[in-house]
Amino acid sequence: MAKGYWIARVEVNNPDGYKDYVAQNGAVFRKYGARFLVRNGQFQGKEGGPHRNRNVVLEFADYATALACFESPEYQRLVAIRAPHGVSDLIIIEGYDGPQP
């Protein structure tokens, strides 16, 4: 079964306010078995734009779990905490589990 992923690009405008979201999101992500693959590492924007100052990729057991985490009351409470402190682009996507080159 293909895994599910969150791909998030965030422009944090108030780092102090954003810290509360970061401090609380671990419990929700643990509940849904999420694993950080990317969490604000070095990057170079090569195409498109504008590029946000924070990038995150989370992996879940499957697409349904990735959706359930986002739609959960626990995470929606965190969205309300995060929202005033930046702008986010987030997609939830099913991984590819087919043949490789």
Image (cartoon, grey):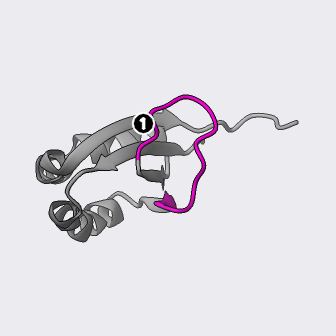
Please give left or right for residue 3 compared with residue 50 in the image: right
* Viewer-nearest residue: 49 or 60: 49
Q: Is residue 19 above or below residue 100?
A: below
Q: Is residue 7 left or right of residue 2?
A: left
Q: Where residue 51 appears, x then y in whole percent? A: 46, 40
Q: Quadrant of the C terminus?
A: top right
Q: Quadrant of residue 88?
A: top left
Residue at x-position 41% and y-position 51%: 53
Picture quadrant where residue 65 is located: top left
92 above or below 59? Answer: above
What secondary structure is found at the residue carrying circle 1? strand
Q: Mostly what secondary structure, the magenta segment?
A: loop
Residue labelled with disc 1: 92
Q: Name the residue rendered at 26%, 63% in the picture.
A: 25
Q: Is residue 75 left or right of residue 58?
A: left
Q: Is residue 26 visible?
A: yes
